[in-house]
């Protein structure tokens, strides 16, 4: 019998490893109808509460689908941006979306890893054509949402490029539109996803000034149990990954519903007459073209300044960036792109991929580029590109762009990306280690389980379940003392404060007994010997227990 026992030193190592890693690989099944409180603020079409307080939007519908798959019951709490973050910090709500990954990290919030949507900041004005670049904000007054993640970036952009702009702050996007439409502000800052058409009483238009692409995530309250947050994050990311991998999934159906192109309204006849009059006036004004030459010269100087600032920006961009024409020829690549491919402008600009890499068998566009052009939407991917001999892995975003073709049929495509090779390989190594650890834990002959600082079971191996007669769902999250250590052999109550297990997770000291008693699910008791090892995660104590049944000592 002694020869068959695993040395206690190995068991201690297994117990320690199990406490540190097992929650990552053996998460329990979500309980039926797990109630989750979700904050909803006005940011159409991503999320918005209607006049009756009923939530809607792309994020709300997507989260609702995921909740249905996981058996969660969602309760929505309407709030403005600042109120939502305050409720999340206090634990009055469990989740908040949409939240940018940068915002979640700056606030120290748990958040999922898989992007729901890519957003960016955009400037709106009262009249079309007022702003064509960030430099046109010189001397202007710009109003923005006080807590908008894009607000800090546009202020930093203005400071970096010496653009003198006055900034005003409001509490919601509707106020931004009102201030721009009614005159106190020259321009306003909204997110790319915000539907200004939902507020027709504020006649504003989107300008061509965009900046600060940001990935949208779901943030979770720091007041939630950390294991519970980890479970929910894993399940959300798993659902999102599966949905993004299927181009016929509800994810893309919701994108089409909430972000699809709208049908152009029929042009009234009087507008056509007006256009004719305008055309006649334009012919008369052609005689003044000589007077415009001076303005052209001035504009040329401004464009050179813009080009210089753009060049400085692209030279300091940490990732790759490129643009292709409608025919698939490269029209721009930034320095990082050229360094990565070990090519120069003469070898790239104006050429097709097949001209640059003739042995690769490449077409004019990569599959993701063709998809971005066909769907007229942003396409995200993580891939190892065929032109990369070093096998590096990249997170890439491809997006369509209209060129100057009057028909609008010729679509250019752009791409930006960052290298995630180390991150991806670390994830793969962690996954492999988790699988090995799980196999090791499940093959152990002795029973092993862990408890948190409240005595609740956080993990348990198959040997322990077999000895105790419980299922995993019956044990995980339950107080272990109430299940297996509640009574003496005569049936009298066994106080928890006398338990060596409690001593380990409350006092932080190792405990051992050679004559313990555990109760099985069928009401029978078994004599056991066990050791309880204290474990600390951050500032929270817990314990790992390793036990085995004493031979020939089963009681009725």
Image (cartoon, rainbow, N blue to C red):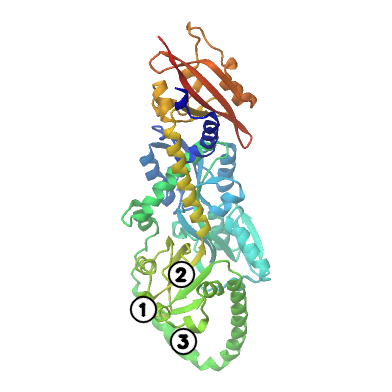
Q: Check the image and report above or below for 42 versus 472.
A: below
Report whether 541 appears left or right of 378: right
Please name whichever residue, 305 or 137, is drawn nearer the observer in this view of the structure: 305
For label 1, the residue is: 407
Mark before the other along the chain sequence, 1 or 3: 3
Marks 1/3: CA–CA distance: 22 Å
Is residue 362 visible to us here? no
Q: Check the image and report above or below for 440 versus 426.
A: above
- Residue 497: image x %, image y %? 60, 16
Mark before the other along the chain sequence, 2 or 1: 2
For label 2, the residue is: 389
Is residue 165 visible to us here? yes
Q: Are marks 3 and 2 in contact (CB under 8 Å)?
A: no
For label 3, the residue is: 282
Q: Secondary structure at mark 3?
A: helix
Q: Mark 1: few, some, or many residues within 10 Å (few <14, many ≥20)?
A: few
**Quadrant in which the N terminus appears:** top left
Report whether 509 appears left or right of 257: right
Circle nearer the viewer, 1 or 3 = 1
- View extreme (front): residue: 3
Q: Secondary structure at mark 1?
A: loop
């Amino acid at each position: 019998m002694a020869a068959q026992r695993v040395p206690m030193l190995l068991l201690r190592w297994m117990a320690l490893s199990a406490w540190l890693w097992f929650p990552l690989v053996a998460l329990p099944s979500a309980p039926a109808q797990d109630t989750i409180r979700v904050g909803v603020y006005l940011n159409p079409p991503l999320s918005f509460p209607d006049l009756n307080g009923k939530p809607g939007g792309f994020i709300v519908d997507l989260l609702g689908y995921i909740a249905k798959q996981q058996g969660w019951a969602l309760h929505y709490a309407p709030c403005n941006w600042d109120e939502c973050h305050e409720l999340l910090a206090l634990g009055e709500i469990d989740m908040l979306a949409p939240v940018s990954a940068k915002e979640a990290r700056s606030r120290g919030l748990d958040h999922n890893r898989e992007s729901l949507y890519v957003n960016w900041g955009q400037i709106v004005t009262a009249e079309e054509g007022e702003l064509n670049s960030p430099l046109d904000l010189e001397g202007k007054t710009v109003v923005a949402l006080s807590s908008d993640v894009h607000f800090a970036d546009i202020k930093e952009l203005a400071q970096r490029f010496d653009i003198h702009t006055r900034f005003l702050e409001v509490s919601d996007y509707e106020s931004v539109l009102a201030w721009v439409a009614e005159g106190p502000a020259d321009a306003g800052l909204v997110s790319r996803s915000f539907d200004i058409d939902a507020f027709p009483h504020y006649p504003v238009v989107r300008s061509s000034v965009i900046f600060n692409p940001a990935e949208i995530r779901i943030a979770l309250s720091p007041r939630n149990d950390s294991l519970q947050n980890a479970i929910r994050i894993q399940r959300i990311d798993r659902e999102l990954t599966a949905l993004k991998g299927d181009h016929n999934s509800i994810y893309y159906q919701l994108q089409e519903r909430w972000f699809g192109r709208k049908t152009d309204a029929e042009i009234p006849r009087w507008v056509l007459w007006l256009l004719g009059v305008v055309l006649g006036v334009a012919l008369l004004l052609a005689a003044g073209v000589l007077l415009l030459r001076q303005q052209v010269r001035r504009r040329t100087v401004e464009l050179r300044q813009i080009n210089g600032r753009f060049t400085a920006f692209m030279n300091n961009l940490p990732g790759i960036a490129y643009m292709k024409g409608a025919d698939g020829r490269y029209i721009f690549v930034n320095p990082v792109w050229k360094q990565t491919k070990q090519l120069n402008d003469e070898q790239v600009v104006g050429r097709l991929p097949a001209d640059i890499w003739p042995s690769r068998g490449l077409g004019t566009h990569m599959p993701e580029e063709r998809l971005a052009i066909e769907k007229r939407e942003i396409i995200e991917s993580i891939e190892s590109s065929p032109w990369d001999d070093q096998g590096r892995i990249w997170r890439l975003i491809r997006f369509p762009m209209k060129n100057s073709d009057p028909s609008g049929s010729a679509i250019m495509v752009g791409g930006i990306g960052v290298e995630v090779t180390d991150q991806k390989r670390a994830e793969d190594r962690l996954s492999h280690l988790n699988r090995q650890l799980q196999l090791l834990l499940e093959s152990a002959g002795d029973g092993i389980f862990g408890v948190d600082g409240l005595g609740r079971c956080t993990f348990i191996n198959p040997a322990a379940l077999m000895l105790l007669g419980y299922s995993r769902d019956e044990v995980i999250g339950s107080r272990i003392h109430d299940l297996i250590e509640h009574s003496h052999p005569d049936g009298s109550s066994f106080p928890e404060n006398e338990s060596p297990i409690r001593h380990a997770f409350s006092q932080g000291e190792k405990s051992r007994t050679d004559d313990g008693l555990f109760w099985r699910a069928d009401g029978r008791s078994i004599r056991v010997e066990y050791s309880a090892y204290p474990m600390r995660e951050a500032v929270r104590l817990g314990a790992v227990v390793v036990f085995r049944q004493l031979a020939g000592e089963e009681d009725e």
